[in-house]
Amino acid sequence: MRRSFLIIAAAVMAVACTGVKQSEYMAWSVKMADSEVTRGVPGANVDSPRFKWDYAVGVDLKALLDIYDATGDEKYYAPVLEFADKVVAEDGSIKTYQLEEYNIDRVNTGKIFFRIYDKTGNEKYRKALDLLRSQLDTHPRNEDGGLWHKAIYPHQMWLDGLYMGGPFWAEYTARYGNRGGDVHEAWQGLITWFRTMDEHCYDPATDLYRHACDVSRQMPWADKETGWSDHCWGRGMGWFFMSAVDALPFIPEDEPGRDVVLKVINKLASMVARTQDESGAWYQVIDRSGDQDNYLEATCTAMYTYSLLKAVRLGYIDKSYLAVAKKGFEGFIEQFVSEDENGLLSTSDCCMGAGLGGTPYRSGDYNYYVHEARRGSNSTFANGPFIMAGIELQLLGE
């Protein structure tokens, strides 16, 4: 790695107290997790009048649970439990969540309840899981079975959406079945979602995934022939990649169509390996990598790195991709990570968010993506996957 020896030494010292032999890569994850716990996970303050149940906080909280599993250190579990306890009422209702919105973003953070329920046995968390799973039963769909991104965005499929609902759907089905129905039907519904996203958003001319598709071809941002949005957004493909590597382990190996998800993983691995910058990082707009005003972006870099590592570890892609992922991990540190006077790690160059349509209107053209606001420091979308990437390297024996 190319950053300061002092930061590396501090990271190694930070893991020494766990009693677990950990690699230099894992040490970075621990130090980033320690930083998140110290400063507070963004969006986790349930008592704030601005609190909203949403997907962003769940990315970091899942990472904290993962590093708790890896180290056994309760300091990572405690803030997740505190959040969960405050946000879920005894009847299983979730603060500010409204099923009838049919917003797929609202499902993602519910993944933390699986492990909270395992550890506490508190039935309110099982009720909350059932509530979120019930949204998927009636969530609006296109005729081919692909889920809409939101009820207010009819017929639109965004790459982001599969991460928000897919891994939750997979884990729920593996644990609890299909809410009394045919479990095969549940698996086929999830696989159909992956299949239709692949069919609607894959651009064979660039061998990349467009950020979104309006299947109805009605939105001004949608191409009238294909329904595609204009570009391949880095984090959009990152969400899609993570959705596939997180969902596939739960799908039974003998389930028909499982190979659809495996093929998506291999396509994405090839895409990100081909478009990696020499620095190890990736660009905000992948199909315009290196162009004027485009920039190396932290969140997609962390997401691709984590996804490649998990896919290598589980045997979904060739081991040669490990070199790409390690270069991504080291490039993330070099390009985006800094340490403050208190020893806390932070990340820079994180796109705050990118969408399509809405009010104010988002056109999805090149100018929109490269000039959308960047977070000054830290993003759950960068720090969470970075933490998980270090854990994967540890599991790989690196």
Image (tube, grey):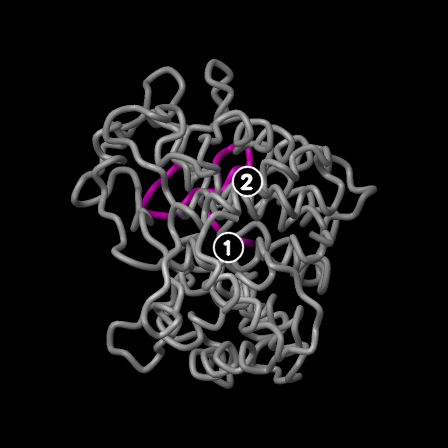
Asked if residue 125 shows in the view, the reply is: yes
Main SS of the magenta part reads: loop
Q: Which residues are magenta?
A: 136-156
**Which amino acid type is marked by label 2?**
Lys
Q: Report if residue 225 lies within the magenta region.
A: no
- Residue at (48%, 31%) from the top-left corner? 276
Q: N-terminal of the two: label 2 or label 1?
A: 2
Disc 2 element = helix
Q: Report if residue 152 lies within the magenta region.
A: yes
- In this rendering, would 259 be left or right of 143? right
Quarter of the figure with residue 285: top left
126 or 50, which lies in front?
Answer: 50
- In this rendering, would 166 be left or right of 173? left
Asked if residue 213 shows in the view, the reply is: no
- Is 345 drawn above or below residue 286 in the view shown? below
Disc 1 element = helix
Q: How many marks?
A: 2
The numbered dot on residue 201 is none
- In this rendering, would 33 be left or right of 311? left
Answer few, some or many: residues within 10 Å of disc 2's Cα (few below 14, many 20 plus, some between 14 and 19). many
Q: Position of residue 84 (x, y in %)?
A: 49, 78
**Which amino acid type is marked by label 1?**
Phe
- Residue at (44%, 56%) from the top-left corner? 4
- In this rendering, would 322 be left or right of 230? right
- Residue at (53%, 25%) from the top-left corner? 274
29 or 258, which lies in front?
Answer: 29
Q: Position of residue 40 (x, y in %)?
A: 38, 75
Q: Which residue is mark 2?
A: 327
Q: Which residue is mark 1?
A: 386
